[in-house]
Amino acid sequence: MKALVFRRKPVRFAAAVVAGRLAPGRGAGVGPLSLDDVDVPDLPGPDWVRVRPRLAGICGSDLATVDGSSSRWFEDIVSFPFVPGHEVVGDTDDGRRVVVVPILTCAVRGIDPPCSRCAAGRPNHCERVAFGCIEAGLQTGFCASTGGGWSTLLVAHARQLVEVPEALPDESAVLVEPMACAVHAARQVTGAGDVAVIGAGTLGLLTVAALRRLAPPAGSLIVTAKHPHQRRLARELGADVVAEPARLAGHVRAATGSWVYGDAELDGGLGTGTPTGRLTGGAAEVVDCVGNEASLTQALEVVAPGGTVHVVGMPATTTLDLTPLWYREVALRGCYAYDPDDFVTAIELVADLDLGRLVSATYPLSRYRDAIAHAAEAGRRGAVKIAFDLRAEKERTRL
């Protein structure tokens, strides 16, 4: 079978880091990712099935892995070599079309009794991600035993499969997993005041849609977007105010009536003052869908005293001035993966909002360098979601 395989190769990993710093996505051409003929993964147990991907998305965590910028904190809960790809719609051997719930929990790993987190219905907090009948791996797509979506076949436990309605196109179904992440984030947001969302890539746009449907703010929903198509889509999906990233503080000030101390400059005629100093108030909640140093710093600048910053985009090692967190008693909260019913809600939202339109381009595995480069530059190139298309693969896996 054909698969894009990520191997532990220190020299090529170092080359990916250098290339990724020069241009996002460039690590795919020089790093430890390669298109290979590999053996079909074994079924780890009787409740496991084979899944042939139709479409498999490329997300921010995949790009960070390919470019070598993801946190080394994950190394003990990832097994090599692994096949990336956790945003998957595909077919099982018995003809069902499914999306994969990628988290590898106690139930999936055959661990009984389950850990306290899984027993409590919080499988995204599973404490056994390096144990059981399969190799270490927090998710499908980062585990040597399961394979991943960037291939012609992977294996999954029955508990990981959610059937897709017949009327839902593949292009919509491939967005169910990231939408489930957005649903999970929206359910953490109280919506009691103004809410700011930082970032309008795939995850940011899906989070805006989930917030508007599940936790509409009592105040304004303010979203930052760099590019014209992102601004248009953010408005369509429910943003009240769409701001260029550099002007977020001015819009938050206008919405909340905050004062500014320190030096202030007028914001492009808004008359609201984008501070080079500090806001006295801010948004009750900030949802960071980027997760880098700049976005986290901005989130701490615009969140209100006593407010909450929800980190939805996957961060890595970074440097932050946490003085405002301490002084203003701000809560910094992570949002990882999903709860059991988030996929059901995600399917409903993806269908209702016709979100398959966010899939901007698909590529065969053979053009993986082009696909990853496109995904890394999606915003600048007027795109949102880039995916691999396995439906047109000429060489199908034979069992």
Image (cartoon, grey):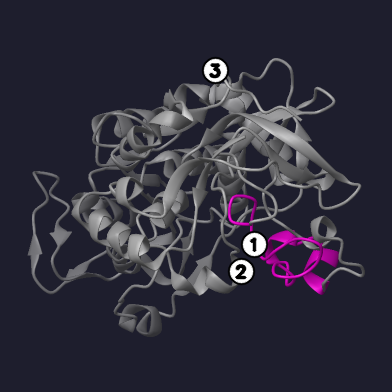
Left or right of residue 222: residue 165: right
User: Is residue 334 shown above or below 6?
Assistant: below
Question: Which residue is disc 2 drawn over?
Answer: 77
Tell me whether circle 2 and circle 1 mark residues in contact (CB < 8 Å). yes
Residue 350 % position (x, y): 60, 29
Question: Which residue is disc 1 drawn over?
Answer: 137
Comes first in the chain, label 1 or label 3:
1
The span from disc 1 to disc 3 (Cα, nearest Å) is 29 Å
Mark 2 Cα-neighbour bin, 10 Å: few <14, some 14–19, many ≥20: some
Comes first in the chain, label 2 or label 3:
2
| Image depth: mark 2 or mark 3 in front | 3
Left or right of residue 377: residue 289: right
The total of numbered circles placed on residues is: 3
Give, as a three-letter code, the residue at label 2: Ile
Residue 80 % position (x, y): 57, 61
Q: Which residues are magenta?
A: 116-143
Give, as a three-letter code, the residue at label 1: Gly
Circle number at residue 392: 3
Comes first in the chain, label 2 or label 1:
2
The span from disc 2 to disc 3 (Cα, nearest Å) is 33 Å
Give, as a three-letter code, the residue at label 3: Ala
Tell me whether circle 1 and circle 3 mark residues in contact (CB < 8 Å). no
Left or right of residue 354: residue 147: right
